[in-house]
Image: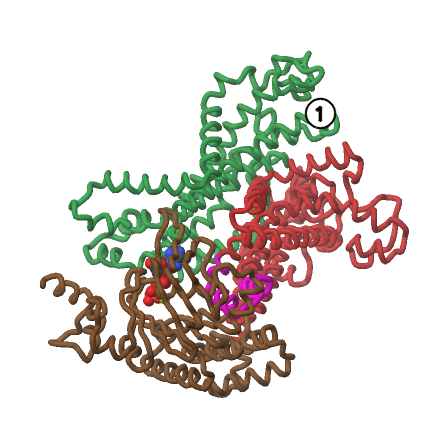
């Protein structure tokens, strides 16, 4: 596509103009997908809520109101206006905890994806670029990691590192990283045969420069799609670890941890179970909707149909 | 075909060795003294420590330790549980049928619903059925299944009182363990109501476990069908005047199933991860619950060997899926 | 009255960027036992117009016509079962890419026997025997063996012979061949064309032959339709077309024939348009 732009009669377009045009085209295809737009809006809302949690949360998320244990939501008999979504078994405001919980989810998603993405790209570039036995060994190791059920491996890693949010995030990132490595490697191998890479080589570009400046920008699309998928899976897996007592530890207002604490009250107080799970579902769904839209917009094969 | 099977088997060997290396490294990575952790003792005298170390083989050089570890595995010695003192392999084999039954029923549910839904959505692309089913599939794909399980318990067990909350069968029934599969054993026992009890225990956990694979299979089937229906040979089938049912059910479906089978195979790993959560919620006595309990009880020999056995199991199932793939794809079959 | 009669056929595709007209008001008619050639460059809507006749276009296509009849029967408003009585029995079609046109998951024997069993109601054994005859008739070497072969185990030429065997299995009255030789080796091309012409005579079928190649037209066709950018440029019987092409585009096509080459390179259609414009 950039070839076509370069050849237009107006002469050379500036980089900024090319970028603007690509962005316009991207937005055209992305916005064709209504679900993706809804997902994007929900995700932006989630970011705003997380950033302004201290301002919009009506209560301190760890404050225990002794006089308000297991209060139902306001619209139900016995609910109180100051606790819109009710309170948990030790009298903490559900709404405030849910609002603060969005910070955890976003933070987990960003950290996990960043670690997995950077690690996977570096490993994949090395494997794809050098090939030979280096490639073989690296890809074997990736296969082995993928042979384990992801949650099980993450659990065992947490058992090694000790329970806690940081270790849970590291564990999940390690488990996800092979996907990025594989994608990068495949893209590098495909791109390496193209003319522009040979041209850059002939022009005397060093290996490192070649890897990061020339090849990487051309395999971004599948990486972005995978990153979105990993973001939502990370939110799910971190919540699962929290639920199993291996992730964020109480009294953290992490949604999975909240569910674990609420488990014994499922028959008595539906709201302590329903809301945190709903929050997880909505945020994961929003990100996955966005992911579908991104894939449509970035995948040139699907674009034509 | 023979070459295909052989290459798949050869391919497994390094992966399997890698898995043993990871399992072997596990206790040595733990924070703390691996000897004491693996022996489940603490505050021992130096003599006792040396004795344990020799007993567990920690006193030799690492390569020797690894070879010994492999040797023990080959003899079926996977260590003993610190809690029950029983061999880990015995426990694994006793619990595995429960997980297998749950996983099998889940994947059957996911396939039997997911494939037809995906096919129908593809045929009626853009219709309300397509939109509703694909939206549901995305919701299912995004589902925190531990929460989904709790919701189903609240509704079906709590509110309606239809299904039991935990276990594999009501304690009322007792019958010999023949196949390890409760559904079959209860039928074989001939006791009235036993099968119904087993089924009612199985239904919610398997629905929960099936949720994500179902969503993935439905989405994958739809996109595979859409792709195949644009192929020249489907046009040929139409040009030959074949009825619509046959064009879709024979010519398109057979080819669309090739990537779908791969997807179904990939769900085995997803299923194992899901089993940990599902078994925890429903107190289902299987491998998943066993692993998570062992981790929280610091029963490290179980964690070490359980990890190994589970990964090996996933690998073997994946191999079987690969072979099935080879069987239905004539390009591979006729090599 | 002609066997196949098409007046003012228009096909539009709905695409992401709007509506695209692939065929724009085309008239075609074919008599029984006649060989009609449709020529035109790539993208001129030759395939699309014939796929419209067969009812094989995707849902994104809108087809309109003042008339589209076969033996007086309206092809535009056929129900599924009614259409299947004609398509695959009285009217059949073979395509440009023989290997991709056969289903990779089934043996070619299965794919031809299916036609015999379902369209002609033969039993398995009858279908097997007839399939063997057909394979012999289209010149497939080692026909018994090849019945059990998968498409990927056969050459492009053999696959096209299988396609032809399937197309003549029900003794159709009209066979549409959409560039049946384009994807094949030059040496095979002639054999396949000869086979088609022989079968046309033997079975007394009408044949619509879509092609790029004016040389092929000269050898095979009774009548020619020249198509360009979805429109019909010219229609004539072969002799008059070659002797006195009416339309500049036709002249351009003819001058691109190797026999008419002047100088050291083959002229192209656009060369011709330029010289035409310069006049
Ligand atoms: N399903 C479709 N959707 C959109 N446009 C299409 C579709 N099928 C064909 N077209 C367009 O219709 C036009 C005519 O296509 P057609 O296949 O009839 O050309 P042709 O004359 O057969 O060319 P060729 O000689 O290359 O086979 C082309 O521009 C093509 O891009
Ligand atoms: Mg064509």
Q: Nearer the viewer, residue B167 or C177?
A: C177
In the rendered view, does C21 fall on the left or right side of A269? left
- Read off the residue under disc 1: A269
Where does residue C29 sit, x and y in percent of width and height?
38, 70
Where does residue A138 sit, x and y in percent of width and height?
44, 55
Q: Is residue B131 visible?
A: yes
For chain A, what colour was chosen? green
Where does residue B227 sit, x and y in percent of width and height?
48, 57
Q: Nearer the viewer, residue B55 or B134?
A: B134
Where does residue A285 sit, x and y in percent of width and height?
53, 37
Q: Quadrant of ligand 1?
A: bottom left
Identify the residue shown where x is 41% and y is 75%: C31
Q: How is the image coloured?
A: by chain
The overriding secondary structure of the stretch rendered in magenta is helix
Find out whether residue C168 is within the magenta segment.
no
Say which quarter of the image contains residue A279. Answer: top right
Find out whether residue B251 is within the magenta segment.
yes
Q: Is residue A123 visible?
A: no
Disc 1: which chain?
A
What residue span does the magenta drawing correspond to? B227-255
Q: Nearer the viewer, residue B96 or A100?
A: A100
For chain B, what colour was chosen? red
């Amino acid at each position: 596509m950039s070839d076509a732009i370069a050849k237009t009669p107006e002469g050379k377009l500036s980089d900024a103009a090319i970028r603007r045009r690509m962005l316009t085209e991207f937005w055209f295809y992305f916005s064709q997908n209504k679900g993706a737009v809804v997902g994007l809006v929900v995700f932006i809302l989630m970011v705003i809520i997380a950033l302004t949690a201290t301002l919009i949360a009506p209560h301190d998320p760890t404050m225990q109101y002794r006089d308000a244990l297991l209060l139902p939501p306001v619209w139900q008999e016995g609910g109180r206006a100051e606790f819109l979504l009710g309170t948990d078994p030790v009298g903490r405001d559900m709404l405030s905890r849910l609002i603060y919980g969005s910070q955890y989810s976003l933070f987990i998603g960003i950290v996990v994806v960043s670690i997995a993405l950077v690690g996977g790209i570096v490993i994949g570039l090395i494997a794809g670029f050098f090939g030979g036995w280096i490639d073989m060994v690296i890809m074997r190791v990736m296969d082995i990691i993928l042979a384990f059920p992801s949650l099980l491996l993450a659990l065992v890693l947490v058992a090694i590192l000790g329970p806690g949010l940081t270790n849970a995030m590291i564990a999940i990132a390690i488990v996800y990283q092979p996907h990025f490595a594989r994608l990068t490697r495949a893209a590098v191998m495909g791109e390496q045969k193209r003319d522009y890479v040979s041209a850059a080589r002939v022009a005397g570009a060093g290996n490192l420069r070649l890897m990061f400046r020339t090849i990487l920008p051309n395999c971004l699309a599948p990486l972005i799609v995978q990153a979105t998928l990993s973001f939502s899976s990370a939110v799910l897996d971190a919540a699962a670890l929290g639920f199993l007592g291996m992730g964020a530890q109480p009294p953290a207002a992490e949604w999975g941890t909240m569910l674990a604490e609420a488990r014994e009250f499922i028959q008595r107080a539906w709201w302590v179970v329903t809301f945190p799970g709903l929050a997880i579902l909505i945020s994961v769904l929003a990100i996955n909707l966005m992911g579908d839209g991104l894939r449509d917009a970035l995948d040139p094969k699907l674009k034509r149909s | 075909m023979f070459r295909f099977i052989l290459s798949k088997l050869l391919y497994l060997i390094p992966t399997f060795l890698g898995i043993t290396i990871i399992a072997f490294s596990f206790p040595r990575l733990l924070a703390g003294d691996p000897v004491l952790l693996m022996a489940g003792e603490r505050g021992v005298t130096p003599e006792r420590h040396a004795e344990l170390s020799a007993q567990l083989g920690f006193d030799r050089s690492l390569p020797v330790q690894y070879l010994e570890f492999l040797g023990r595995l080959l003899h079926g010695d996977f260590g003993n549980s610190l809690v029950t003192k029983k061999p880990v392999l015995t426990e694994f084999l006793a619990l595995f049928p429960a997980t297998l039954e749950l996983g099998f029923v889940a994947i059957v549910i996911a396939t039997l619903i997911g494939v037809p839904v995906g096919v129908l959505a593809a045929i009626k692309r853009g219709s309300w059925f397509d939109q509703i089913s694909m939206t549901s599939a995305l919701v299912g794909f995004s589902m925190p299944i531990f929460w989904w399980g709790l919701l189903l318990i609240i509704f079906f067990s709590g509110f309606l009182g239809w299904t039991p909350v935990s276990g594999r069968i009501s304690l009322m029934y007792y019958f010999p363990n023949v196949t390890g599969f409760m559904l079959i054993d209860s039928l074989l026992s001939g006791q009235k109501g036993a099968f119904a009890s087993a089924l009612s225990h199985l239904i919610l956990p398997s629905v929960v476990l099936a949720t994500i694979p179902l969503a993935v299979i439905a989405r994958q089937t739809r996109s595979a069908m859409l792709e195949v229906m644009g192929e020249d040979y489907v046009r040929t089938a139409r040009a030959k005047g074949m009825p619509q049912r046959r064009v879709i059910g024979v010519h398109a479906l057979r080819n669309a199933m090739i990537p779908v089978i791969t997807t179904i195979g990939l769900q085995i790993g997803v299923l194992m991860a899901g089993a940990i959560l599902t078994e925890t919620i429903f107190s289902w006595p299987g491998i998943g619950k066993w692993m998570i309990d062992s981790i929280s009880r610091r029963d490290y020999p179980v964690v070490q060997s359980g990890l190994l056995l589970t990964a090996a199991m996933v690998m073997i199932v994946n191999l079987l899926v690969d072979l099935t793939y080879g069987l239905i794809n004539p390009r591979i079959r006729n090599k | 009255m002609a066997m196949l009669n098409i007046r003012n056929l228009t096909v539009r595709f709905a695409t992401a960027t709007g509506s695209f007209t692939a065929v724009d008001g085309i008239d075609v008619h074919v008599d029984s036992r006649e060989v009609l050639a449709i020529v035109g460059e790539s993208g001129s809507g030759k395939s699309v117009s014939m796929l419209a006749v067969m009812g094989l276009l995707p849902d994104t296509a809108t087809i309109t016509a003042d008339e589209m009849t076969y033996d007086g029967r309206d092809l535009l408003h056929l129900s599924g079962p009614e259409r299947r009585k004609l398509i695959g029995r009285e009217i059949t079609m073979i395509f440009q890419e023989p290997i991709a046109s056969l289903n990779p998951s089934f043996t070619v024997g299965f794919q031809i026997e299916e036609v015999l069993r379902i369209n002609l109601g033969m039993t398995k054994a009858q279908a097997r025997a007839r399939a063997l005859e057909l394979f012999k008739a289209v010149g497939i070497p080692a026909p018994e063996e090849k019945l059990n072969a998968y498409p990927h185990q056969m050459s492009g030429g053999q696959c096209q012979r299988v396609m032809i065997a399937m197309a003549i299995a029900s003794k159709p009255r009209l066979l549409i061949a959409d560039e049946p030789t384009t994807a094949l080796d030059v040496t095979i091309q002639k054999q396949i064309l000869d086979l088609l012409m022989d079968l046309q005579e033997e079975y007394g079928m009408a044949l619509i032959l879509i092609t790029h190649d004016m040389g092929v037209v000269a050898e095979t066709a009774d009548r020619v339709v020249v198509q360009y950018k979805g429109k019909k440029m010219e229609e004539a019987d072969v002799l008059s077309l070659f002797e006195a092409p009416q339309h500049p585009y036709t002249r351009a096509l003819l001058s691109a024939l190797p026999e008419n080459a002047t100088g050291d390179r083959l002229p192209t259609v656009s060369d011709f348009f330029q010289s035409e414009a310069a006049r």
